[in-house]
Each structure stands twice: as C-alpha cells, then as structure tokens.
Image (cartoon, grey):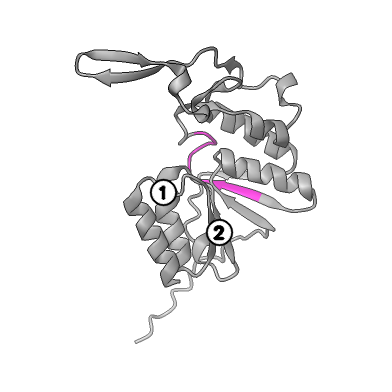
Amino acid sequence: MAAESTGSELPERESMEFDVVIVGAGPSGLSAAIRLKQINPDLTVVVLEKGSEVGAHILSGAVIDPIGLDKLLPEWRSEDTPIKTPVTADHFLYLGPAGSIRLPNFLMPPLMNNHGNYIVSLGNVCRWLASKAEALGVEIYPGFAASELVRREDVDVVYNALPPAGHAEWTIAALEAGKAVLCEKPFAMNASEARRMTEAAART
C-alpha cells in the first residue's frame, strides 16, 4: 500500500555546481586546491572539511620539509606564516628499560637529516593554507563529512586527501562505489588496511 501524501513533503535540497570537489582540508587537500586555481583561475573549486573548522582534526606537531611550499607558494618565506621554527639539531635515541643511548647521526639515513626543515603545528599550517586558498577563490565549507559524494553518479574520480586514519575507510567506500581513486601517502596505517584496500581495488 502506498503511503498517503501529507502535503508536507520536504523541500528539494539546495545544490551548487563545482568543477572540483576536494574532501578534507588537510595540507594535501588545501595544496591541491591552491595548485588547481594557480593553473586555471576559472575553475570552481570547493574543499569540504568534516571538522568544525579547518585544522580542528589536525592536532599534531610535525617536522616539515619546505621544498613543497617553495614550489607552491614561493613568496611564503617573506610573509607572516606559522612556519617560524627551524630545526637546529637532530638527536636519535635508542630507548631501553635502563635508559637511553644516543645514536651517532652519521649512522642515520639521509632522510632522517632535518637540516633546513621546520617544526610546526599542522593545524596552524592548515589554517594558513586555507587563507591562501580562499584568497585565490577556493570555497571552503567546514562541518561537511561529504559521505554521499563518493556514491554520486556524476562523480568519476575521488582524491582522498584525508589524514591517514581515514584513507582505508573512504578509499574502500569510493572503490566499491565504482570510482577511480587517488589516495595520498601513506597509503594505509598498517598492512591489514593496505590488503583490504588492494582487495577492494581488485574487485572493482
């Protein structure tokens, strides 16, 4: 039996059209949005962030290599940014029950050398990148999980720029919805997640 209409149907949802939708206002998502607008200022680009504000879910400190920023925003060193604290020394310790032993720096691989890198709050860096993106015309909407986007028929490609903890869940969801997926590194948090993701890709 069909349900009778009560005359109080919900109004149609408001919608907006964009050329590119990026889910996740982390460093990767915001950098992608900035680069897209640099390449083609006429593109309409939106970034959706499930947190209440940009940086709300990125609480960690980090040591960053500025080489990417030098290419993306060459003028950043002359501006007031949250990237202010250069690394002055590296100390590598072997921890044991009786204490710690410092390992000689020359034994460490080159990628462990942080000379020229900076100590930052990633949340503050994301907020700064968001201001740069908005200045270029990128629209940013916090408070949107965007869970329905990966299943929409008019979405062909999903770029997963979420923090690593969200890579497996959303990559698998997008794959199972029949989308092509580009996932930021690290690909997964552990071998089990990586196996589930590759198995989902093989099935679809």
Q: Residue furthest bottom?
A: 1
* Front residue (pair 41, 203): 203
At x 69%, y 39%, the residue is: 133
What's drawn in magenta, residue-wise?
46-55
Position of residue 85 in the picture relative to residue 40 (left or right): left
Task: Establish if 190 lies above or below 128.
Answer: below
Q: Which mark is in front, 1 or 2?
A: 1
Which residue was labeled with disc 1?
Answer: 188
* Front residue (pair 33, 18): 33
Which residue was labeled with disc 2?
Answer: 158
- Dot 2 amino acid type: Val
Position of residue 91 in the picture relative to residue 44 (left or right): left
Alpha carbon distance from label 1 to label 2: 16 Å
Q: Secondary structure at mark 1?
A: loop
Q: Position of residue 20 (x, y in %)?
A: 66, 56
Q: Position of residue 203 (x, y in %)?
A: 41, 71
Q: Position of residue 40 (x, y in %)?
A: 79, 50
Q: How many residues crowd mark 1 within 10 Å: few (<14), some (14–19), many (20+)?
A: many
- CB atoms of marks 1 and 2 within 8 Å: no
Query: On the image, which quarter does residue 98 sit in?
Result: top left
At x 40%, y 65%, the residue is: 200
* Front residue (pair 94, 73): 94
Q: Position of residue 113 (x, y in %)?
A: 52, 23
* Front residue (pair 168, 56): 168
The quarter of the image holding the N terminus is: bottom left
Residue 138 belongs to magenta span: no
The tag on residue 173 is none
